[in-house]
Amino acid sequence: MELEQLKSLYSLLKTPELFGRYITNSHIEKCMKRIPHSMNSIVGHSVEGRPIYFLKFGTGPKRVLIWSQMHGNESTTTKALFDCFNLFLTNNNFPNLILESCTLLIIPILNPDGAERYTRFNANEVDLNRDAQDLSQPESKLLRQVFDDFKPHYCFNLHGQRTIYNVGSTNKSSILSFLSPSQDVEYSRTPNRKEAMALIVEINSALQKTIPNSVARYDDGFNLNCVGDTFQALDVPTVLFEAGHFPNDYKREEVRYLMFVAILKGLEAISRGIDSDMHTDYFLIPENAKQFYDIIIRNVKLDENSNELTDIGILYKEELVDKTINFIPTIEVISKLDDFYGHREIDAKGQVVNNHEDKVLEVTNENDFVLINNEKISLKPLKNSFLMRN
């Protein structure tokens, strides 16, 4: 299916119950009522006894294991998965191609305790993506058991990344990022790793038509404690998907659509067959760099008696309050930031910049607004039009 067709269908496919950053079991349980019972079940439970669901679509010979929200605060891919489910449940040639070629086993929230708390870790404060060897947590054991029982031919490991990443050394935000994990310390290009690389090349080719020069890849540093590295080491082509930052899209609704496209294009490529010779183009995708702040205030004077100008780098701290994510502008650095970019840039034009109490700014200060020449400037995220939703 062409991208324009997917985009035209998307408003009908988008799951309305899932919106914003805070997505938990209680949210997806409402959505699963529309999915036939034969396609979903409980595969296990978390540390605190919350159910871990899995869904099964398709009857094809190519087995694909997909999991999301291994980190509880990385919810964009979960939203995108449920949008994909809506497409799978339609009688359309495109999902039929996938579902006749593949059997998909999908865990939409692997870490429901972390999702409830909006934290990366599980209830025991363990990072499940560093527990692939110790298997110390019930969620880790569950995923490994599903892997062993299902014997997938491909794995999709779905995550979200911070707003700090840019593509190469450019001022382009890494809207989506990917990785074909290494499976040994030599970073060997094994047959299965090449296949994962070629799969990313196909996904990237589709995405470039919508977000040119805004796709990056992670470096392939090896860590066998990571789930992707472990599954790759078990000779299963594994792809890490990372949902990043689209301009002003702090609720991750634009990126949700793009991740929906990326997942479907990956499954389409698997359905049609992957040419591993394409793997060399993987290295043409620029690596992620960390050169973004949410806001940079440039040309700042900190003291009326000083002639020296500096910059202020601000990042949003995400805080869960009453089941809503608040974005708290927090000063990360006060320094010249010539080699960095801001998703939003404010030029102070040599004026004194103070905090909301008209006092000198300091690193770690949390400020909803600043005063520039006594003018109140809000630092809260700008509203996004969510073009992909319309």
Image (spheres, grey):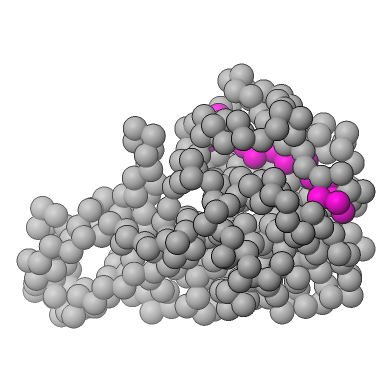
Locate residue 199: give its quadrant.
Answer: bottom right
Quarter of the figure with residue 135: top right
Q: Is residue 83 left or right of residue 91?
A: left
Membership of 186 in magenta stretch: no
- The stretch of residues the image draws in magenta is 99-115
* Residue 105 pos. (x, y %): 78, 41
Q: Could one spot residue 252 in this view of the protein?
A: yes
Q: Quadrant of residue 265?
A: bottom right
Q: Quadrant of the C terminus?
A: bottom left
Q: In the image, residue 30 lies at what x, y percent? A: 54, 32
Of residues 243 and 6, which is closer to you in this image? 6
- Residue 138 appears in the figure: no
Q: Is residue 372 left or right of residue 257?
A: left
Q: Position of residue 342 (x, y in %)?
A: 38, 70
Residue at screen point 67% across, 31% down: 53
Relative side of 227 to 383, left or right: right
Which residue does the image show at 92% across and 63% down from the upper left?
Answer: 191
Quarter of the figure with the N terminus: bottom right
Q: Position of residue 72 (x, y in %)?
A: 55, 39
